[in-house]
């Protein structure tokens, strides 16, 4: 993975005494020599310290807005904040965790999170691979098709929910009106738990499928073309080629997409919050589509239960990291088997 | 070589693109009709003539221009900062050898899998304690440099900058920073443009963090949120809400028309190298 280069800096400093132009070297006085040595010393520090200086902004910022908040969340979760931050309550150990884990609303939010995640990730990956396969042909107007597929990506989730919210409106939404015309019962998109997940997953899929299709397309184009030629010489048709050559070859990309969409998909927030068309916005009147991230926001920022929100955040955090690691382990297992 | 695709391929792709475009089209159709027409059935299928009227109602309801200016400021600031810091760090990881570089790079990659957005409560407290709550600085702060940016620039610069060129610059007596400026930055320019685009869009479309960090000040997404709240009622005022949604999408749509090609290459590049 790493492409180690020759230690460019060291080589440069080693030659730096003879650095200046020749005529300058000929007239070296004691003063100039001292300046040269000073410069050389400075240059050595320059070479040694610069790389650390260049990478430091990331680490400093990550420490402030990533690591510290994460650890502080853990600290907060062990105290009873009693709704008022400046009066820190007493140390309560794992009480907040017990509260959150036995809170029916949090449990419901976890189930919702997973349900929405599954409904959005699985069809999305399948569809994206399909679209990528369509794009991976000798199309006329390639750039046009690739750009068109990406169009939904420029619509902010906020705008997307509002648009889809009107399509999925319970009473006058166009989808329900059409269902009515066909003679079917209208679906209560904002009330029925699983249908609301379906609607929310729909907008997530709408926004991300094209984006992922382009990632898959890039992977497909990296597949050596002679593999296809060999396959077609062996008598494999288009479909057979897709399953026997394309899919196995893009597996690493598939894993990458699955992992990133897991991390993102388990933190869905904007859609469930704005899908609620009542002013309280806690994921439906009965929390039918409240996700865990929304739970953390409502508990922590709106209700100011810092301890409980922090406990919920840590639980969700552990779940996400755990699933990411599991994903990683499974993929390593699978790829290793496929190599041998 | 494989043959030119047939009608089936074009048909399926066309259907997908149609599905991608329809919701956006829908927002402009509904947003350009009166409230009564927008809620009628069968719904209008073509854009109407009331867009300006609805736009005026949007401007009366929320401070749309101020919100857009705020979004523009924050997204640009984050874009510039991310590009600058990520290029520096990516260059160091790709081309300079220093003790611990592998471990540090591994750490950067690892942080991409850490959902730090979950720690909103301490971040909120942090912003409040430093009196940053309700400022644009608070919105921008968490996105001044990203792990993705560092990773992306590193991957690009590994191949884009010949090591001999760096050595030559050093031989000529360039300081490290000057070498970076004269050798790495020109080579990194295409990737910098792409990274800027992505960061800009990410910050522009973000909803959760501004919602936490702001109170009276509004970014575009927060203004849209408030617009949706106003539009609620016995029958939701979709003409108003969707006009706002459409208006808020226009800037990015323009960006897409101008730089969509770069977005496509950016996504595809990131995928192969990532």
Image (cartoon, coloured by chain):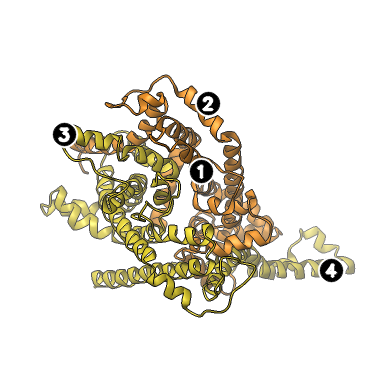
- Observer-nearest residue: B185 or A337? A337
Residue hosting label 2: B56
Q: Quadrant of residue A11?
A: bottom right
Mark number, residue B221: 1
User: Label 4: which residue?
Assistant: A33
Numbered tag placed on residue A182 in the rendering: 3
Labels 2 and 4 in the same subunit: no
CA gap between label 3 and label 2 equals: 37 Å
Please say whether residue B92 is visible from this viewpoint. no
Task: Check disc 3 and report its element: helix, strand or loop.
Answer: helix
Q: Position of residue B250 (x, y in %)?
A: 48, 33
Residue furthest to the top in view is B49
Chain name for mark 1? B
Chain where mark 2 sits = B
From where the camera sits, is residue B176 visible?
Answer: yes
Mark carried by residue A194: none
Q: Name the one closer to the observer, B228 or B243.
A: B228
Q: Which quadrant of the figure has residue A251?
A: bottom left
| Chain under numbered label 4 | A
Q: Colour of chain A?
A: yellow
Mark 3 surroundings within 10 Å by alpha-carbon count, few (fewer than 14), some (14 through 19), many (20 or more)? few
Q: Quadrant of the C terminus of chain A?
A: bottom left
């Amino acid at each position: 993975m790493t492409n180690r280069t020759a230690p460019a800096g060291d080589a440069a400093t080693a030659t730096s005494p003879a650095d200046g132009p020749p005529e300058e070297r000929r007239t070296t006085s004691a003063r100039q020599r001292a300046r040269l040595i000073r410069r050389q010393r400075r240059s050595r520090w320059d070479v040694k310290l610069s790389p650390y200086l260049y990478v430091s902004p990331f680490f400093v910022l990550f420490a402030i807005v990533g690591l510290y908040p994460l650890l502080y969340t853990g600290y907060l979760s062990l105290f009873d904040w009693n709704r008022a931050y400046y009066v820190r309550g007493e140390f309560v150990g794992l009480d907040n965790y017990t509260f959150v884990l036995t809170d029916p609303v949090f449990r419901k939010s976890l189930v919702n999170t997973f349900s929405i995640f599954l409904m959005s990730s699985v069809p999305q990956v399948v569809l994206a691979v399909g679209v990528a396969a369509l794009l991976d042909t000798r199309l006329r107007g390639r750039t046009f098709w690739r750009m068109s597929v990406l169009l939904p990506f420029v619509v902010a989730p906020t705008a997307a929910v509002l648009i889809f919210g009107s399509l999925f409106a319970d009473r006058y939404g166009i989808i329900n009106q059409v269902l009515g015309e066909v003679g079917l019962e209208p679906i209560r998109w904002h009330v029925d738990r699983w249908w609301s997940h379906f609607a929310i997953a729909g907008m997530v899929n709408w926004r991300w499928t094209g984006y992922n299709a382009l990632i898959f397309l890039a992977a497909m184009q990296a597949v050596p073309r002679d593999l296809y030629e060999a396959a077609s010489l062996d008598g494999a048709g288009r479909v057979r080629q897709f399953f026997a050559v394309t899919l196995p070859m893009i597996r690493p990309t598939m894993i990458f997409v699955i992992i990133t969409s897991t991390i993102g998909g388990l933190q869905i927030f904007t859609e469930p919050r704005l899908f609620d068309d009542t002013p309280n916005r806690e994921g439906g009147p009965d929390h039918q589509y409240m996700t865990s991230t929304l739970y953390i926001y409502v508990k922590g920022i709106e209700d100011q239960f810092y301890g409980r929100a922090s406990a919920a955040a840590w639980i969700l955090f552990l779940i996400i990291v755990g699933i990411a690691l599991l994903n990683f382990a499974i993929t390593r297992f699978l790829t290793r088997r496929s190599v041998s | 070589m494989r043959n030119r695709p047939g009608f089936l391929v074009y048909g399926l792709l066309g259907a997908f693109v149609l599905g991608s475009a329809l919701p956006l089209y829908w927002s402009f159709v509904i947003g350009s009709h009166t409230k009564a027409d927008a809620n009628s059935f069968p719904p209008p299928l073509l854009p109407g003539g009331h867009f300006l009227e609805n736009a005026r109602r949007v401007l009366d309801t929320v401070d749309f221009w101020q919100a857009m200016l705020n979004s523009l400021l924050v997204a640009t600031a984050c874009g510039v900062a991310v590009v600058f810091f990520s290029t520096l760090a990516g260059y160091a990881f790709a081309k300079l050898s220093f003790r611990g570089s592998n471990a540090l790079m591994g750490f950067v990659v690892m942080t991409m899998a850490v959902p730090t957005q979950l720690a909103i409560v301490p971040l909120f407290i942090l912003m409040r304690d430093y009196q940053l709550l309700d400022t644009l600085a608070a919105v921008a702060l968490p996105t001044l440099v990203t792990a993705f940016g560092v990773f992306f620039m590193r991957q690009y610069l590994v191949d884009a900058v010949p090591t001999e060129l760096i050595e030559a610059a050093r031989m000529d007596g360039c300081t490290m920073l000057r070498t970076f400026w004269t050798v790495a930055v020109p080579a990194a320019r295409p990737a910098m443009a792409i990274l800027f685009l992505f960061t800009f869009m990410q910050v522009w479309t973000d909803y959760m963090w501004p919602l936490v960090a702001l109170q009276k000040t509004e970014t575009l997404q927060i203004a849209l949120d408030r617009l949706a709240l106003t539009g609620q009622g016995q029958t939701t005022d979709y003409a108003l809400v969707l006009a706002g949604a459409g208006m808020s999408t226009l800037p990015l749509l323009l960006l897409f028309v101008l730089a969509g090609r770069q977005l496509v290459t950016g996504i595809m590049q990131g995928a192969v190298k990532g």
